[in-house]
Image: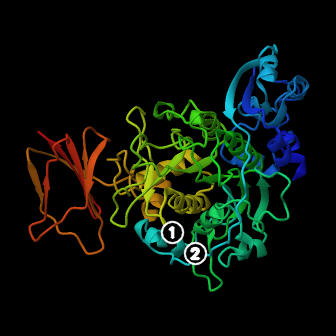
């Protein structure tokens, strides 16, 4: 595996060097060009598994974004006084630590296209934590998504390569629901971008209070108890794990770690990546906060890299939508969940409406975000909804390995219980495994819906079964929700009343949909 190790790993600096450089900040340095010698040799940049994946999905073996950053340019940055940390071949850029005088010299270099601040160095106290094995039963999310269909058909994501990028995997090797992954050698590779020298203690030593977050996420994707009770859907997948987030601090300076890890996973043939990380606001230095308008899928470096991953590399990225839905001055999805091609996942209540915290899609995007939603498997947070969708998607890849990431996403969206009447609260709603499998087999997508017109109220003369979801989304236009509710029915059915700010209302009762246009 070492022969495919990206240049960024060789350039990563130690934690101590970062911490000592108190006067420096972190920057992205973008280059104007690349060395194009030997560009038709993908085997120098990709593993056999990656080449096999590209051939299967009819993705070009060689791409300009696979060519490494010029070593001469990196040496020139070092000669100018910068400490290079990550070289991104996709962005044709390098992140580095430097003071203002050094950055002035770098800006003057003839091959430098742009220099942008990335943030301050990571310097923080480390807090020990104790791993916790979550014993919540595997059930509600699976029931919502009709995912027992996958289990009944013995779809377990067998040998699908999954990447997980998170804040840490402390305790994973001793977690009773994940131990089998280690016993069966299903953890193929690990990378700690925050503390690059850590390898033997990757699973056994905690540096921050969030170092077991990725362990819980992994359990939601692939957890299996010793008595074969499932806590995740992808129980026969194989995994690459990367830690890119310092759990006790928030910096833009971690975005390059995420990008580097994604490039690493792609080079190894990973088909699907799950990440619970998002970048928007709440940074330790408020000057690093993004504005809502920058969540447009193309402004942030992390979103630009995610766009390359989905449009050029054939990767299926599953990204938690974010937990800012109730934040007064934000509310919307964070980067990279804002990218059109990623599968952004929101969180629902058990009743199937949006949780108060789940981030919504911004008004200015010409596409729908989030894409789908489901109830979190444990606790709260879109971090624990996304892994359920990742396992779901990995099983679909096993069922139809030649389908592209876009085709898998389309099947998941079209199987949603709100399709085609998606909204910016929960996207196309909760996916249905049986429907998704049929869609991948070429059957008609989605359910029919009735469009009706009404003035002040509309009676839907239908009774709901005890276990059927019922939900109402009042909207100001086709997708923007202004209010949601779980309707109360009686023997006559459901009386839907017009919301004062609504131009239309979507009503879900079991498997049936109505769109009421208010006159």
> Is 73 rendered above or below residue 470?
above
Q: Nearer the viewer, residue 44 or 263?
A: 263
Q: Position of residue 219 (x, y in %)?
A: 62, 69
Is label 1 in contact with label 2 (beta carbons under 8 Å)?
yes
Q: Which residue is mark 1?
A: 378
Locate residue 436 relative to residue 500 in the image: left or right.
Answer: right
Determine crowd level at label 1: few under 14, some 14-19, many 20+ residues with C-alpha closer than 10 A: some
Q: Position of residue 513 (x, y in %)?
A: 25, 55
Q: Quadrant of the C terminus?
A: top left
Q: Nearer the viewer, residue 209 or 179?
A: 209
> Is 392 rendered above or below residue 224?
above
Residue at position x 8%, y 47% from top? 456
For mark 2, give the secondary structure: loop
Q: How many marks?
A: 2
Q: Quadrant of residue 477?
A: top left
Q: Which residue is mark 2?
A: 134
Confirm whether residue 55 shows in the render. no
């Amino acid at each position: 595996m070492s022969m495919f190790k990206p240049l960024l790993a060789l350039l990563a600096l130690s934690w101590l060097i970062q911490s000592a450089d108190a006067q420096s900040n972190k920057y992205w340095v973008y280059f104007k060009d690349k060395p194009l010698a030997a560009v038709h040799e993908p085997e120098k940049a990709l593993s056999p598994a990656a080449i096999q994946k590209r051939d299967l999905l009819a993705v070009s073996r060689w791409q300009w974004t696979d060519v490494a950053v010029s070593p001469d340019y990196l040496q020139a940055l070092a000669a100018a006084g910068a400490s290079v940390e990550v070289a991104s071949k996709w962005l044709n850029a390098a992140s580095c630590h430097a003071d203002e005088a050094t950055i002035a010299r770098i800006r003057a270099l003839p091959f430098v296209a742009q220099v942008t601040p990335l943030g301050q160095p990571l310097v923080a106290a480390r807090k020990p934590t104790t791993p916790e094995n979550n014993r919540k039963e595997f059930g509600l999310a699976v029931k919502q998504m009709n995912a027992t269909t996958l289990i009944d058909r013995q779809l377990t994501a067998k040998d699908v390569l999954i990447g997980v990028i998170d804040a840490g995997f402390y305790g994973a090797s001793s977690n009773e629901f994940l131990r089998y992954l280690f016993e069966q050698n299903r953890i193929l590779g690990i990378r700690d971008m925050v503390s690059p020298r850590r390898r033997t203690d990757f699973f056994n030593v905690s540096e921050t209070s969030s170092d077991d977050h990725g362990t819980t996420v992994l359990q939601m994707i692939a957890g299996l108890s010793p008595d074969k009770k499932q806590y995740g859907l992808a129980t026969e997948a194989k995994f690459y794990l990367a830690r890119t987030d310092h759990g006790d601090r928030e910096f833009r300076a971690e975005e390059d770690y995420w990008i580097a890890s994604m490039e690493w996973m792609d080079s190894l043939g990973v088909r699907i990546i799950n990440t619970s990380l998002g970048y928007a606001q709440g940074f330790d230095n408020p000057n690093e906060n993004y504005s809502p308008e920058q969540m447009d899928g193309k402004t942030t470096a992390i979103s630009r890299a995610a766009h390359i991953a989905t449009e050029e590399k054939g990767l299926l990225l599953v990204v938690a939508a974010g937990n800012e839905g109730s934040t007064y001055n934000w509310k919307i999805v964070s980067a990279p969940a804002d990218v059109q091609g990623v599968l952004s996942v929101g969180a629902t209540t058990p009743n199937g409406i949006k949780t108060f915290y789940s981030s919504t899609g911004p008004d200015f995007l010409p596409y729908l975000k989030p894409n789908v939603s489901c109830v979190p498997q444990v606790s709260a947070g879109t971090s624990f909804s996304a892994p359920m969708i990742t396992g779901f998607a990995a099983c679909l890849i096993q069922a139809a390995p030649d389908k592209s990431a876009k085709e898998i996403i389309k099947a998941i969206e079209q199987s949603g219980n709100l399709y085609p009447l998606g909204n910016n609260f929960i996207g196309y709603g909760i996916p249905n495994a049986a429907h998704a499998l049929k869609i991948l087999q070429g059957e008609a997508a989605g359910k029919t819906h009735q469009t009706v017109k009404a003035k002040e109220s509309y009676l839907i003369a239908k009774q709901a079964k005890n276990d059927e979801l019922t939900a109402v989304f009042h909207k100001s236009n086709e997708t923007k929700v202004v209010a949601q509710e779980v309707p109360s029915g009686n023997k006559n059915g459901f009386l839907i009343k017009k919301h004062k700010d609504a131009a239309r209302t979507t009503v879900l009762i079991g498997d049936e949909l109505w769109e009421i246009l208010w006159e």
